[in-house]
Amino acid sequence: MARRTAIVGVGQTFHRSRRPDVHIGELCAEAVKAALEDAEIHVRDIQAFVTGNMELFEGRYVQDMWLADWIGAVGKPGIRVTTGGTTGGTLASVAFELVASGLYDLVLAVGFEKQFEGDTRAGLKTVADPLWIRWQTTGAIGYFSRQARYYMKETGAPEEAGAMVRVRLAAHARNNPHAHLRLDLESVEEVLKSPYLIPPLRQLDMCPTSEGACAIVVASEERAARMARRPVWVKDWTSVHKEAIYVRGGRHSVADLEMAASRLFRRNGIQKPMEEISVAEIYAPSTWAELEWLEAYGFCEKGTAWRLEEKGVFYWNREFPVNPSGGVVCTNPIGATGLIRVAEVALQLRGDAGPRQISRKPTLGFSSAWGGSGWTVAHLLSSSKD
Amino acid sequence: MKTREPLQVLGRLYVPYANWVGETTSQFLCELRDKRRLRGTGCSECGKVFMPPRSVCPTCLASLETWVDLPTTGLLMTYTSVHYSFGREYQPMDPPYLLGIIRLDGADTGLCHFLGETSFEELRVGMKVEAVFKENREGNILDIAYFRPIKAAS
Ligand SMILES: [Zn+2]
């Protein structure tokens, strides 16, 4: 029987396109120190560490070894997690598992990326199957262009729909001092002036490459009772993997997202996700992915997300706040990105999100991470223990 | 079906990188390059002096903001001799050459570097050594060319 587990501290850096003032260890130390400060504990209290980032993105291997003496992990147990785009989400899951299993009472997870330091193109090429697809892939932009085209065709959504998402995310990011892109985008027209990457995907539709780190402190129920912060309870989590080949010729599919969310909701008796869940921080690398994936997670019916976007219901002060942090489209330090989703939901459930605090009473929160060839990690967090 | 001829797919990916060293290391390397000066950082919590300097203490996670001037002399803590080559693009000089770990006077940690103007037979653990700087310095740790034993005053 798994033990009750809680998040008792979160910390993140201020995310930028480049952080020449710090090296990788120093960047992670910033996030770790922020999380320890939030939890009001000393690093010596931490019993085990989970670290992670994208393989090869900085031209450095065994990053866990590089990091040990910058995050206070020397001489302590630890494990490195590197599951591609889902890394940040898996970091949280592994920290939860280490505590829920009874092995440790206090675990710290930290994820980071410093994307401009290596050749991410080379790193991403190794993701693609070398026999069949390696040299044909066009990376994330090709994938999300196809996804946008597919969504427009299936649902009849006009080009303005993606732009509406972008305007909302810009408004959210301006409330979040940690966000990377905090643009003064006020209108759909401004977004539609943005150049195409691959039509219909525009530059403003797509996430940036960011440098930053995020850390969380996870505690057992007994340890959480003696912590400074109100614990955010970990209700459930899951992950879904798909086949290894990067892009098959077949139909565009969101089966991994559907499976992950429906499994969590079924296991926890959630029948009306948009009513029962008060906030969602979803890992969507583009505006169009955000629309399609809200449907895939089962928050709304197929083909209706862009209609709800038109009505403004996904704004932080409205009925169903989606990515009140500004989301991945505004901030994407890949190895940290999934963990930022978890940390942001935790802040919302604590009521500590400052200017980006949702208006709705926060009770249940959903966070997700996505990557690879359609992998999903999802978490359900709660402000109450039961 | 019989395997007639096992094939391989060939490819080569380059792994270039340009890691920022951070403000603390930048300041250290600039002073090494411009003034031939070596400075460490001190931890106010545990009292340790780090050379090379760090911005965060590995045990306390305290921010290390105090600079400590160090001399260019120190003690040889250990040494060895390298006799094999795995390619000049991965090694700064051709073997055989000498490597040592040097603790500068006033520092609590060691720095791994080359040893020159000496021989394996002459080296002793605990002997005094001093840094010899390159003429044309570029702002990296190899701006110290090597350490050499300090000859007894004659
Ligand atoms: Zn210290």
Image (cartoon, coloured by chain):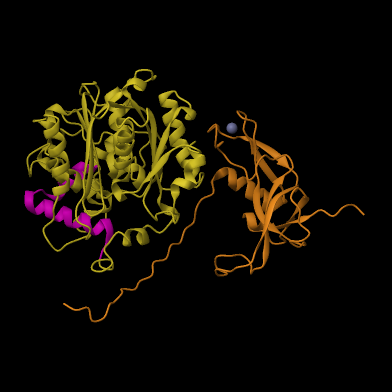
Chain colours: A yellow, B orange
x and y, in percent, of residue A229 in the image: 36, 20
Q: Quadrant of ligand 1?
A: top right
Find the magenta span and give its range: A137-166
Single out the residue that lies furthest toward the front: B2
Please state, as top left, top right, bottom left or bottom right, where the C terminus of chain A lies in the image: top left
Query: What residue is drawn where x is 62% and y is 55%?
Result: B140
Residue A282 visible in rendering: yes
Horizontal side of residue B130 vs A99, given as left or right: right
Query: What residue is drawn where x is 44% and y is 46%?
Result: A64
Residue A24 visible in rendering: no
Horizontal side of residue A314 vs B88, given as left or right: left
Magenta run includes residue A163 = yes
Magenta stretch: helix, strand or loop mostly: helix
Please state, as top left, top right, bottom left or bottom right, where the N terminus of chain A lies in the image: top left
Horizontal side of residue A114 vs A92, given as left or right: right
x and y, in percent, of residue A285 in the image: 26, 47
